[in-house]
Image (cartoon, coloured by chain):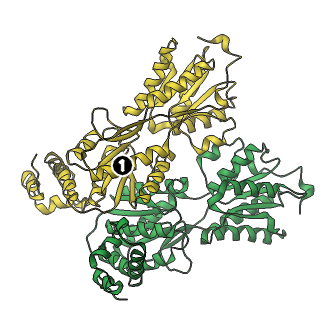
Chain colours: A yellow, B green
């Protein structure tokens, strides 16, 4: 790869002035530049690897004692709690953290990575969105110190701290079966992210290992964009017909929140009418009238380990550390032993 | 004020080398420098206004299309929802936001301001902690574009977007009185922050205007550091004795969350045993078995206006815009008309 791509190279290739290229790549005077020209400039810049050269350049400067953090969505309590833990851990090592959220959007995540590296952070902690694998590979190629959290790409050999998501859901489904439930539904997000697939895999594996026939309509994969109506429709479906599900597992905190709100509005009795397991621990769960069995992620450990690994990586960039942590199943009343409806089982 | 303070000036004044001063002010080689010497260097730097000169210097550079945001505590849903709104609004103007939380600590807030300005953000949106007035005055003196949100200092003439907190609580207490409640308690945080004092002032003013005698033990100011046990003790106190309170107002979302959890554990019936009003709207409220009357802050408007004002300020630094927004009282079942206990009133 050519390591000396300049604005001039891009300008010559596109056939425009260097100034115009500079405007486009620095997002200036947008309204006064033709869209197709701007796009062409961006395409050539990407093709010539201009951005990543910039990134590499920024690394030559000395330490700033600042870490960059990219979370999926800062308004989600999982992200914001983790951000807070990382801030506290970094502070203990005299580092300041600046962060932003990718909003599950690979364009935004690329822009944030650029912004943070131009602002000369010493390293990055990233919860990468779907479609960001090439950005992560770029960082690695340019020896940018980074650690992935929550999500990772199994095909890329990078440092990460993540949960064993498959085992977490497996244990929860296994527990439901132990408690007498046989018709178990899963409400999850449509996603090609590895960690969400792992949750689905855990569900299917547990049913299989306990010799329960899986019915396709028990698994509801809903679009994150229209979460509320889709969760309500999925729940209605799962509870309809002659053989409604006896237990339901929500695979993340937003799905759980909307699901529980809807169950509350239906005046369903938990666990008598329906047993519930939620993924993630949030304050909201504590206000539900029945204490909810949930899968607790070791948030503090995830945040602290990611920070420590990043600080190590800043000193020795070649070291790769991969950590898979185990979740804890916190059993509460929402999954009490099933008695009355056992006759319907299997 | 001398605008040309250098590392050398500080070194001469303390009687150490310029290199040593540089290490201390850049937080390097901490373990190898005597603590009293490091402190002396920091004191002299502060006395000579070294930091603020650095800040002024960083402003000479060109636009980076990056905004800095300092929230009180990113793990609090008020902060994180606001951060998300500001990110979205900034993105609409092609700006990226990087942020951090001050943890209600003026030292951390100073460090973050330094970090963000050194990282060359074009301007700052700040929810300042208690004790940060001098930092804000410094920013103003050096013509750093900034807007305060949520909190402000009435003695400083700065741009801000904030809630009319006094009116918000006044309206809630007025509503409780309209609904027949007379013995009304307030659980709030110990704080000298203006916005928290305004909430207390609204409570007292409403009682006075409706000719209700205020009893000192109805007002509980608890320490943020030991929130949970203090809220439980305060609630016990308010409900004890021959004349327990009939209604309770929690003045922010964390106080409300812990308060509701405790009331749930006591198996109190809301509103039959106790009427409840909460400040702030959070997802958690929706899972409580009785829908809760609450004070809704116009979060979207706060975030969007702050962002727009900041972007204006970046272009014309002399303009000061102060916005006081009104809250909305969302009336739900937790403050239904009081009937049974009206005999105890006044």
Residue B107 in picture, x, y percent from top left? 47, 69
Residue A214 shows in the view: no
Residue B5 higher or lower than B126, as above or below: below
* For residue A22, side relative to residue A302 (left or right): left
Residue B205 in picture, x, y percent from top left? 74, 71
Residue B246 higher or lower than A293, as above or below: below
Q: Residue at x 74, y 49 (%)?
A: B334
Q: Residue at x 62, y 20 (%)?
A: A246
Q: Secondary structure at mark 1?
A: strand
Kindly identify which residue carries mark 1: A125
Q: Residue at x 80, y 58 (%)?
A: B238
Residue B198 in picture, x, y percent from top left? 65, 70
Chain letter behind tag 1: A
Residue B286 in picture, x, y percent from top left? 64, 44
* For residue A173, side relative to residue B3 (left or right): right
Identify the image quadrant of residue B308. Answer: bottom left
């Amino acid at each position: 790869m050519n390591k000396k791509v300049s604005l001039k190279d891009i300008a010559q290739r596109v056939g425009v002035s260097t100034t115009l290229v500079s405007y486009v790549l620095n997002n200036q005077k947008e309204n006064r530049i033709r869209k197709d020209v701007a796009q062409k400039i961006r395409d050539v810049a990407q093709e010539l690897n201009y951005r990543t050269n910039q990134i590499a350049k920024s690394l030559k400067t000395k330490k700033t004692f600042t870490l960059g953090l990219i979370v999926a969505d800062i308004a989600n309590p999982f992200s914001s709690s983790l951000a807070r833990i990382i801030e506290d851990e970094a502070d203990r090592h005299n580092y300041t953290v600046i962060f932003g959220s990718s909003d599950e959007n690979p364009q935004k995540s690329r822009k944030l990575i650029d912004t943070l590296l131009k602002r000369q952070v010493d390293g990055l902690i990233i919860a990468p969105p779907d479609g960001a694998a090439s950005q992560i590979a770029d960082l690695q190629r340019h020896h940018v110190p980074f650690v992935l959290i929550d999500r990772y790409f199994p095909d890329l050999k990078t440092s990460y701290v993540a949960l064993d998501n498959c085992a977490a859901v497996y244990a929860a489904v296994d527990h439901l079966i132990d408690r007498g439930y046989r018709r178990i539904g899963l409400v999850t997000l449509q996603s090609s992210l590895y960690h969400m697939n792992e949750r689905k895999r855990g569900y299917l594996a547990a049913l299989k290992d306990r010799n329960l026939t899986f019915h396709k309509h028990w698994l509801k994969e809903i679009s994150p964009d229209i979460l509320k109506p889709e969760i309500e429709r999925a729940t209605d479906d799962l509870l309809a017909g002659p053989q409604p599900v006896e237990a339901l597992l929500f695979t993340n905190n937003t799905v759980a929140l909307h699901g529980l709100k809807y169950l509350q509005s239906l005046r369903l009795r938990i666990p008598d009418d329906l047993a519930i397991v939620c993924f993630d621990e949030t304050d909201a769960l504590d206000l539900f009238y029945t204490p909810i069995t949930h899968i607790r992620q070791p948030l503090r450990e995830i945040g602290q380990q990611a920070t420590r690994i990043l600080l190590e990586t800043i000193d020795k960039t070649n070291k790769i550390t991969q950590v898979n942590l185990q979740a804890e199943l916190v059993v509460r009343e929402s999954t009490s032993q099933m008695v009355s409806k056992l006759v319907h089982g299997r």
